Image (cartoon, rainbow, N blue to C red):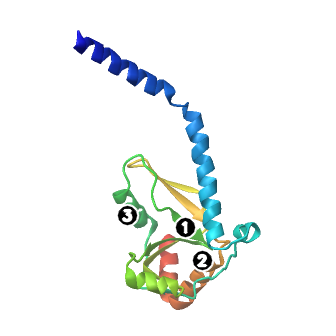
Amino acid sequence: MDQARQNSDSRNNYNSTISSFPPFSVFKSKVRSLNRKLYSGIYRCVGLEEEERRKVDFDFRPWRRIIVHEVNFEPLPKILGYIAASTPMGGTAEPALRWCNGWLFFISGAPMGPEIERERMGQVMRWLSLGLCPLEKWIPLLEIPDGKIKVPIFDVSHIPLFRDMIEWVEKTFPKEVEEAKKVVQ
């Protein structure tokens, strides 16, 4: 009999404890209030006033130098073959190809490490390879029929960095550029 009364008492205590909790919305509003107090306290600790806290300075620092380790001129079927090999059937290629001033291209960046990170902080970027293929007109999407793979092509001809890159390629590799253009015709 005592055991049954204890079980009944413990259930009643549990139910009364649960029913004494406020609804979740009360907790939610208290958490928001605490967050506001915490963040305003943090700003007060560092001595920032409301106007200073909202002001953000932006600084534009373009790359000073891009180091390209390898430049490859590839025919379009070969580039699409690389993409098909690394993209699941029915998928969309990642990363997409880019087009600028008559050239389709892709860039392979250097993997991040402490030395590369240090160079980037000094506004120097490394590209392990730059693959190019002449493509007279921009088309937004190529499809590889074998695997039903879609390859988006971004028109980046409005970006000065890529226009300068194409100009540099044409000046630095005139023979290769001429050969690549002959293959397409």
What secondary structure is found at the residue carrying circle 3? Answer: helix
Question: Could you say which quadrant of the image residue 46 lies in?
Answer: bottom right
What secondary structure is found at the residue carrying circle 2? Answer: helix
Ranked by sequence position, the earlier of labels 2 and 1 is 1
Q: Is residue 137 visible?
A: no
176, 90: nearer the viewer = 90
Q: Position of residue 153 (x, y in %)?
A: 55, 61
Which residue is farthest right?
Answer: 51
The image shows residue 86, relative to residue 27, as above or below, that is below
Label pair 2/1, CB-CB below 8 angstroms: yes
92, 137: nearer the viewer = 92
- Please report the residue visible at 37 percent of the width from the left and 79 percent of the height from the top: 113
Q: Position of residue 184 (x, y in %)?
A: 50, 70
Q: Is residue 98 left or right of residue 69?
A: right
33, 144: nearer the viewer = 33
Q: What amino acid does circle 1 point to?
A: Arg
Q: What amino acid does circle 2 point to?
A: Phe
Quadrant of the rendering where the N terminus is positioned: top left
Residue at the spot of label 2 = 162
Q: CA distance from mark 2 to mark 3?
A: 22 Å
Classify mark 1: residues with Cα within 10 Å, few (<14), some (14-19) or many (20+): many
Classify mark 3: residues with Cα within 10 Å, few (<14), some (14-19) or many (20+): few
Ranked by sequence position, the earlier of labels 2 and 3 is 3
Q: CA distance from mark 2 to mark 1?
A: 9 Å
Which residue is farthest bottom?
Answer: 172
Residue at the spot of label 1 = 98
Q: Position of residue 33 (x, y in %)?
A: 63, 48
What secondary structure is found at the residue carrying circle 1? Answer: strand
The tag on residue 61 is: none
Which residue is farthest front?
Answer: 2
The tag on residue 82 is: 3
Ranked by sequence position, the earlier of labels 1 and 3 is 3
